[in-house]
């Protein structure tokens, strides 16, 4: 890809990932892993210790850059992903993000009454400057090795944490609000969509070369409700994104975990690629989306707890299921959800080598 002369960054040496997202031919299937920088890597745990906490890590661009690059130093991955979290946006809206040890993310001031909902406003982007600084620093230090992915949560997935006040097994509070007071829920979602669109555009300005919207909890919604309360707002975000920067296309990936039944509808919101979890057959998904979007996914992360032979076997099955690469289609290999913190790091070496080697061989047949 010809990087424009106006870019302040080094030219890209490996654009395989971006080409696959844009459904252009590639020599092999590019890959990266959701949560590729994280606790399964001892070097991540060491940096996290120095930073004192997860938020200490994520809010400091030097530390965020260091951990973003760690998986790339170990493995031949084809993309880097900004080290941050989807919950930085509600944090910047004043909800007070914190992590209780061993309990996951929580908010000090969740949206639990009408007054709190009505006071909600899109954040001042200066509150998120540490994220944009990290993007620019990571892109600079990548020095053109691979593209950098920026990301955000979807309006609905952010709303789940904002109303529940943390993770949830049943989404009782957020769904009660959705059914009792759809007006309040739509107010939150409208505010989140505006925030997410400007947040992603600022990441693109700072140097992100592709962006991904994580709709982790869209799959918890009923049919019909998903379309109105999650998909419609992702469509709105996608329509507001800058799709080109410095003369280079910026692909957009949307990922609804558990969204396989709605694949055609998701493929229709204007994104370049759709992420799939492991419940979906990749070959059938390819038939269903046709030339509309590229696909990203979708190995069960738990395959990485099996032995090297089994990992290679599952990779072969997945690549086989996707079928022969052809112009107008695109596949980015990934897991169907984030990598587990208990994953043996050696399993990832086996996986990356298998994907690259087997997908090259497929193209030579
Ligand atoms: O993919 C990457 O390498 C980039 C970094 C990234 C993190 N979170 C780092 C992180 C990304 C893309 C996310 C997104 C995110 N965060 C999502 C959407 C994607 C998904 O996984 O479904 C969600 C739902 C969150 C919210 C969140 N953040 C949770 C539920 C947790 C706790 C997880 C746990 O297992 O404790 C976090 C914290 C978090 N975000 C960690 C990491 C590496 C673990 C923090 C630690 O080091 O203790």
Image (tube, rainbow, N blue to C red):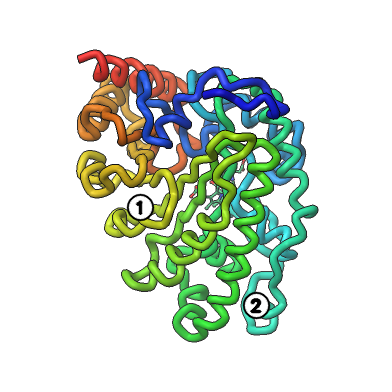
Q: Residue at image x 66%, y 52%?
A: 199
The answer to whether one can see residue 167 in this image is: no
The answer to whether one can see residue 228 in this image is: yes
Label 1 to label 2, Cα distance in Å?
A: 31 Å
Residue 255 image offset from top left, x and y in percent: 43, 50
Image side of residue 142 versus residue 60, left or right? left
Q: Quadrant of residue 281?
A: top left
Label 1: which secondary element: loop
Residue matched to label 2? 117
Total labels: the figure holds 2
Residue 240 image offset from top left, x and y in percent: 57, 57
Q: Residue at image x 31%, y 69%?
A: 223
Q: Is residue 103 above or below residue 204?
A: below
Q: Which mark is residue 119?
A: none
Residue 236 image offset from top left, x and y in percent: 51, 62
Q: Quadrant of the C terminus?
A: top left
Q: Quadrant of residue 162?
A: bottom right
Residue matched to label 1? 267
Q: Residue at image x 50%, y 19%?
A: 75
Residue 18 image offset from top left, x and y in percent: 47, 31
Identity of the residue furthest to the right in this view: 126
In front: 205, or 59?
205
| 10 Å crowding of disc 1: few (<14), some (14-19), many (20+) | many
Image side of residue 302 versus residue 58, left or right? left
Q: Residue at image x 62%, y 39%?
A: 245
């Amino acid at each position: 890809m010809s990087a424009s002369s106006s870019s302040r960054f080094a030219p890209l040496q490996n654009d395989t990932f971006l080409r696959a997202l844009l459904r252009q031919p590639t020599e092999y299937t590019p890959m990266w892993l959701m949560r590729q920088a994280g606790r399964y890597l001892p070097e991540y745990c060491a940096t996290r210790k120095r930073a004192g906490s997860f938020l200490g890590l994520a809010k400091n661009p030097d530390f965020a850059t260091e951990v973003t690059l760690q998986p790339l130093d170990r493995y031949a991955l084809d993309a880097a992903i900004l080290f941050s979290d989807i919950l930085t946006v509600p944090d910047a809206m004043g909800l007070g993000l914190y992590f209780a040890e061993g309990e996951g993310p929580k908010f000090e001031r969740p949206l639990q009454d009408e007054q709190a909902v009505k006071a909600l406003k899109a954040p001042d982007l200066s509150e998120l400057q540490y994220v944009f600084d990290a993007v620019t620093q990571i892109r600079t230090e990548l020095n053109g090795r691979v593209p950098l992915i920026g990301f955000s949560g979807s309006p609905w997935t952010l709303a789940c944490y904002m109303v529940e006040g943390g993770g949830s097994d049943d989404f009782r509070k957020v769904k009660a609000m959705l059914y009792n007071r759809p007006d309040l829920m739509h107010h939150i979602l409208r505010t989140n969509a505006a925030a997410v669109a400007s947040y992603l555009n600022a990441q693109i300005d700072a140097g992100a070369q592709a962006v991904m919207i994580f709709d982790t909890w869209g799959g918890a919604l009923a049919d019909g409700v998903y379309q109105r309360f999650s998909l419609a707002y992702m469509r709105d975000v996608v329509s507001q994104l800058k799709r080109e920067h410095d003369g280079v296309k910026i692909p957009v990936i949307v990922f609804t975990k558990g969204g396989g039944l709605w694949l055609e509808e998701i493929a229709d919101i204007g994104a370049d690629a759709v992420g799939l979890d492991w419940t979906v057959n990749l070959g059938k998904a390819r038939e269903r989306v046709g030339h509309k979007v590229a696909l990203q996914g979708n190995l069960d992360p738990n395959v990485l707890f099996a032995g090297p032979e089994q990992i290679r076997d599952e990779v072969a099955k997945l690549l086989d299921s996707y079928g022969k690469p052809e112009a107008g289609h695109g596949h980015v290999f990934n897991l169907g959800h984030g990598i587990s913190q208990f994953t043996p790091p050696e399993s990832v070496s086996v996986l990356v080598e298998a994907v690259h080697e087997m997908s090259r061989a497929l193209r030579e047949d």
